Structure formats: C-alpha cells, structure tokens
Amino acid sequence: MVISTVIGYMLLALFPTIVWLLFFLHEDKKPAPPRLILKTFIFGALMSIPVLFFQTISETLFSSQISSFFLMAIILATIEELFKFFGAYFAIHKAPEFEEPVDAMIYMVVAGLGFATIENFFVIASVMFQYKFIFAFTAVGAALILRFIGATLLHTLASAIIGYFWAKGLVRGNVKKFVFLGLVIGTFVHAIFNLLVYQFQEINFLIPTLFLIAVSFFVFRDFEKLK
C-alpha cells in the first residue's frame, strides 16, 4: 500500500513538468529527436546535484554576512540558472540536430524542466513524510498546483529567456556575450520571483503568479520571433 502510494505521488510530481514540456514541444514546428530531448532532460535533472552542493556552501559562507534576502536570492538563483545552462549545453551543443536558433530555446526549457522535476520530487516527498504518506493527497495536490503555476513555470520561463539569448548569440555570431546577458536577465527574473514569494507568502501567491504571467507574455513573444 505504501509503495503504491509513493509511486503514485512521484508520478503526480511529473505532471507539471509534462504539461509545460508538451506545450513547448507542440509549438516547435520541427520536433526535436526524442533521444536528444530525453538526454537534455536527464542532464538538466543531474544538475540538481552540483546545484545543491554549491547552494549549501553559499548559504554556509554568506548567509551570516548578507543581510539582504534579495542579495542571497540572487546568489542562489545564479547557481541554478548557470547549471541549467551547463546541462543543456553539454547535452546538445555538439549534436548535429542542434541546427536552428529556436533549438537553443527548446533545449534550455527541457533542461530547466528536468531540474524542476527533481525539485518537485523533493517537495512531494517532504509533504508525504509530513502527512504520513497515505493521508497526504490533499496536501500533495495543493503543492502540485503551486509548483505548476509557481516554481515549475519559473524554471521554464527563466530557462527560456537564457535560451532565447543563446539563440540570438548564434544568429549574431557572439554566443558568449548573449548567453551572459541571458543569464543575467534569467537570474534577475528568478530572484524577483523568490523575493515576491518570500514577501507575500503569508498573504497569498497572487502577486508572484501575476509576475510570472507578465514574464510569460514576453517569453512567448520571443519564442514566436525565433520560430
């Protein structure tokens, strides 16, 4: 009973990822090879290991020295966005199928969703232990809704922003400059969202959600430009 419940909850944790993944893949006029999609997703998921290591070190070294939550949010967001880019880059930069600028945006989203999936697993596992596994369904459902419109969407949008600038760098022949710019903007969006969640968590998540909706407007517009 417990094992089947755990498996069910873990499958539910994949739901936000699958929805956003299918959305972006459906919008791609020239579908990427499933093999490369899976590889990029796994690489993005694996990046959670070094991210956890470096974030733990950063919190240990700097949390007592940095009084501003926003500055700490920038440091942690920078680590996540940087390693998500590494995941996508190492997965596909030498692949012959990586042939169009829009591919950079697609694969960055896939890597971001791989990373977000690991986060979802940890969140759901935490809720399960807190509510004794079998009785956690309502709490898990609430957590998944927040992940769907919150953190999973955040990782999707921040990664898409980096991918968009990566694509621009490929077109203009200056990848390093544009990837750096994308990382700065993606990290800033990530940090702002974290700050809004921190500031308004005792009220509701409406303001952070509205912020992501506003960001998504620009991301989807840029996606259409690349296509």
Image (tube, rainbow, N blue to C red):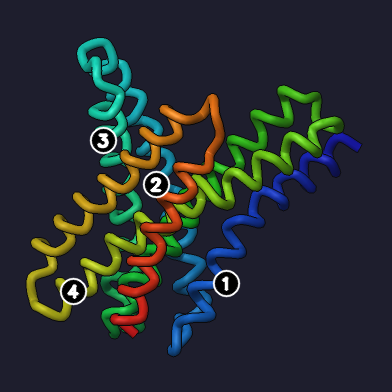
Mark before the other along the chain sequence, 4 or 1: 1
Label disc, if present, on residue 22 of the rendered structure: 1
What crowding class fits label 1: few (fewer than 14 Cα within 10 Å), some (14-19), or many (20 or more)? few
Label disc, if present, on residue 163 of the rendered structure: none
User: How far is disc 3 from disc 2 in space, using C-alphas?
Assistant: 18 Å
Q: Farthest bottom residue?
A: 30
Residue behind mark 3: 74
Q: Nearer the viewer, mark 3 or mark 2?
A: 3
Mark before the other along the chain sequence, 3 or 2: 2
User: How far is disc 3 from disc 1 in space, using C-alphas?
Assistant: 30 Å
Q: Secondary structure at mark 4?
A: helix
Mark 4 is on which residue type? Lys
Label disc, if present, on residue 168 of the rendered structure: 4
Q: Contact, CB < 8 Å: mark 4 with mark 3?
A: no
What crowding class fits label 4: few (fewer than 14 Cα within 10 Å), some (14-19), or many (20 or more)? many
Mark before the other along the chain sequence, 4 or 3: 3
Label disc, if present, on residue 47 of the rendered structure: 2
Tell me, yes or no, if residue 55 can be seen here.
Answer: yes
User: How far is disc 4 from disc 3 in space, using C-alphas?
Assistant: 24 Å
Q: Position of residue 87 (x, y in %)?
A: 35, 56
Q: Nearer the viewer, mark 2 or mark 1?
A: 1
- From the viewer's perspective, is residue 66 above or below residue 24? above
